[in-house]
Image (cartoon, grey):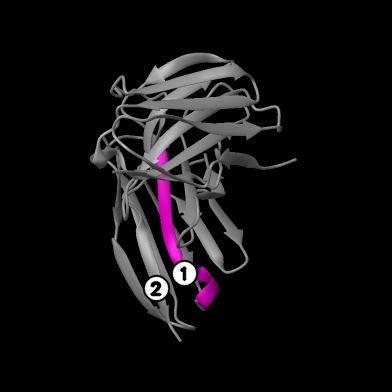
Amino acid sequence: DTEVTQTPKHLVMGMTNKKSLKCEQHMGHRAMYWYKQKAKKPPELMFVYSYEKLSINESVPSRFSPECPNSSLLNLHLHALQPEDSALYLCASSPWAGGPTDTQYFGPGTRLTVL
Amino acid sequence: GQQVMQIPQYQHVQEGEDFTTYCNSSTTLSNIQWYKQRPGGHPVFLIQLVKSGEVKKQKRLTFQFGEAKKNSSLHITATQTTDVGTYFCAGPGSNDYKLSFGAGTTVTVRA
């Protein structure tokens, strides 16, 4: 299995809702990432997990809460989001510890709309 | 913030023509990676360059890493409609631990 899967593909939520995004990889990769991508912009790093431990939090607001239950799974819990949080949320994984020489494998993304 | 600058932002190409997109950094890069994102898709890894002056080819795509390891280029020959998309270069970020993406070059092809 050489892919990263993400669910759901699309999500519409209100500002008072709580939802979760899920990501899974079975490539034995040791690092997993969450990115946010706005239209016509590059992916913007949010979080990095290395060996199931949070290694980078790019000053993301606390309404986004990551979780890594095991080496294959990555969740992003969403609560009290704002309309400006609407974006494509990409999960990625890489073979090693998550440094800048690791090549990253991206999932198809979850397109999130916050009303 | 972004550590690599990418130009041009947009490239409109006649089918069959060649084009080049460039990636520049003010600091020496340990490596540079290139990704392609098709419209409506997700970034897909293309290549990684590590050595000074390195040149790698993938069919009609030629990737170069500068001698000073501060710039890189992607050259596509005989552009096809399948080349449509946004090409991102990515290098070490501000804390040298994460990967930081350039702004991307969005390519459209006129048939």
Q: Between residue B5 and residue A88, name the one nearer to us.
A: A88
The residue where tag 1 is placed is B84
Q: Are marks 2 and 1 in contact (CB under 8 Å)?
A: yes
Residue at (65, 25) in percent of width and height? A72
Subunit that carries the residue with mark 1: B
The quadrant in which the N terminus of chain A is found is top right
Q: Number of numbered discs present?
A: 2
Question: Measured along the vertical axis of the image, is residue B32 above or below residue A48?
Answer: below
Which residues are drawn in magenta? B81-91
The quadrant in which the C terminus of chain A is found is top left
Q: Which mark is residue A115?
A: none
**Which quadrant would residue A28 be assigned to in this image?**
top right
Q: Is residue B90 a member of the stretch shown in magenta?
A: yes
Q: Residues within 10 Å of mark 2 (few under 14, many from 20)?
A: many
> What is the residue that sits farthest to the right in this orientation?
A1
The residue where tag 2 is placed is B108
Q: Residues within 10 Å of mark 1 (few under 14, many from 20)?
A: many
Q: Is residue B35 a member of the stretch shown in magenta?
A: no
The x, y position of residue B25, in whole percent, is 30, 42
> What is the residue that sits farthest to the bottom in this orientation?
B111
- A87 sits to left or right of B42: left
- B52 sits to left or right of A31: left
The x, y position of residue A65, in whole percent, is 40, 21
